[in-house]
Amino acid sequence: MMKKKWAALCLAVMLGLGLCAGAAAEESLEPWVDACTDLLFRTGNVTLDGEARFSLDGAWFKTAEGHYVQDGTNSLWRLALTSPRKDGTKRETGYTVVANGGMVFVMEAFTPGIYRSGTDMAQNTVLRNTVQMNQMVRMAAVLADQIRPMLGSRLAMTETELTLQLSEGQTPALLDSALNVFAEFAVKRLFMMDYDTVPAEQTGAVYGYITPFLEIINCTREIRLRETNLRMVKGAALPESVEGTAVLDLTYTDGSTHTLDIQFRGTVSDIGTSMVDKFDPADFGVEPAADTTPVERMQEVYAVEQ
């Protein structure tokens, strides 16, 4: 489901920025790296809340507000999406997903009163770890160690708080290269878009995409971090919050450059006390959805995006 994957990417961006910047900030990298990796890959009971606002070339196109609860192999994921319609009004969409072990139950805002169910691999952590993901996390720590001396006074920190401020022209080239590698990995995992199959010299016009997000995913060939303002707070064991802004320059297939502005915040709470009940349709006032063909399903999604 596109919206589910899109929201997962938002979560990865917010927490991933905290991982990279946090790792870069300490004399000893291990406390920040361990805190972030523990949260994402080793914590089985936690609640996350966050919000992200996206604008392309100065025009706002999406706001996402998310609430995620992990309780062993049970989880609850609520997302509210707001975007502009062509007539100037706002479109409110989103979904709720409940997972009980390998069973998944999905309720979408544009089909109220019904739910769809399916199966997936049971997961007891916020993000699914893999051999490649493990290597990406290790690489983030190594790169942070290399990038840190290049940042100088633009990094400020105490034992529990970190701030990073970069203005235009201050981003190290190594950081831009790392950002592209991690972004391509995230898009491949979440959207099955494998940039390794796209010829580097491929060009093309930019038009016809239903949403700005799909345009960005399909047309971006290079990302550069123009500026960022990041603040991260951690407790004794895990991160507690991350917030900030980022301005990215995107180079498209036709050679044009576009600006993506992101404002984000995230909080961590209820560690060890979060609870997710077994899915009960009566709790949500829903009934099983009638079967639909793939064409009918795409028509539903397209209608909502207009």
Image (cartoon, rainbow, N blue to C red):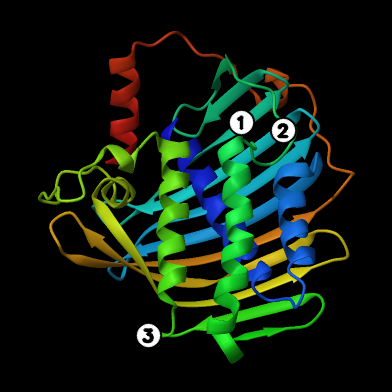
Q: Secondary structure at mark 3?
A: loop
- Left of 47 or right of it: where is 81? left
Vertical side of 178 occupied by 197: above or below? above
In the image, 254 versus 176, the foreground residue is: 176
Q: Which residue is mark 3?
A: 169
**Image coords of residue 22 (percent x, y):** 67, 69
Give x and y (percent) for residue 249.
Answer: 32, 69
Say which label, 3 or 2, has the lower sequence index.
2
Q: Residue furthest bottom?
A: 153
Which tag is nearer the camera, tag 1 or tag 3?
3
Location of the C terminus (image quadrant): top left
Helix, strand, or loop for circle 2?
Answer: strand
Q: Residue at x 81, y 32 (%)?
A: 72
Label 2, on which residue? 75
Q: Are marks 3 and 2 in contact (CB under 8 Å)?
A: no
* Amino acid type indicated by mark 2: Ser
Q: Nearer the viewer, mark 3 or mark 2?
A: 3
Please, is residue 214 above or below residue 88 in the view?
A: above
- Judged left or right of residue 97, residue 241 is right
Residue 162 visible to an observer of this rendering: yes
